[in-house]
Image (cartoon, rainbow, N blue to C red):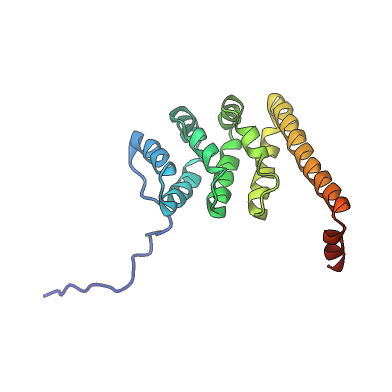
Amino acid sequence: MAHARISMYMPPDINPTQAAIAYGCRALPKLNEELQSEDLETRQKALMALCDLMHDPEYVYEAINIGCLESLKALLKDSDHMVRIKTTEVLHIMATHNVGRDGFLEHDIIPALALLLNDPQRICRENLHQTYKQLAQLPSGRLASCTWIWWALALLVQGYVRTQASRRHCPQEEDKSSAW
């Protein structure tokens, strides 16, 4: 006679960092809802699952049609660094497909990405760079990317010039900075 034994260990195929994905045509709408959730863990899990799904161009096409790009654009401004990193990773994967690059141009993703050029997280900036590299493969993407990159760089330079000008007017702060 066999006895039932319950293991204390989790099964090897369960990933607690990834959201459960619905089947069929409900998968991406459910993930899009989770991207808009107030709960940080729910957003992070949805982004992890989305990273896996976006390798298929059919899912990229469906994600664009149901409005995932708007949700991802909003997540680029999230205060959590992991959400921003995973969002840029999803966008980078989407940009590897032609349909994704076209969707970026239609939904004005490039200006939202340009605001992350000065993000404190190195991985986020690397994903951003890879996304722009993919966008540069389309002639229209190249033009739009360059325009927004120059705009963002101009803002960064303008902020640097203002900082230098304020240091000239406040010699006490300059003395503190020269001590470093």
- Return the x and y of residue 149 as percentages of the image width and height: 74, 36
Count numbered badges in the picture. Answer: 0
> What's the residue at 60%, 36% (across, down)?
95
- Left or right, 41 with respect to 8, comes to right
- Image x and y of residue 165, in percent: 85, 47
Which residue sits at x=48%, y=37%? 71
- The quadrant of the picture occupied by the N terminus is bottom left
Closest to the observer, 112 or 9: 112
Quadrant location of the C terminus? bottom right
Residue 133 pos. (x, y %):
70, 39
Closest to the observer, 128 or 138: 128
- The relative height of residue 159 versus residue 102 in the rendered view (above or below) is below
The residue at 40%/41% (across/down) is 31
Query: Quarter of the image holding residue 170?
Result: bottom right
Furthest toward the left, the residue is: 1
The image quadrant of residue 93 is: top right
For residue 109, which quarter of the picture?
Answer: top right
Q: Is residue 35 left or right of residue 3?
A: right
Taking depth in this image into account, of 29 and 41 the one nearest to the observer is 41
Q: Give the percent coordinates (x, y) of residue 7.
A: 27, 73
Q: In the image, is 122 to the left or to the right of 72? A: right
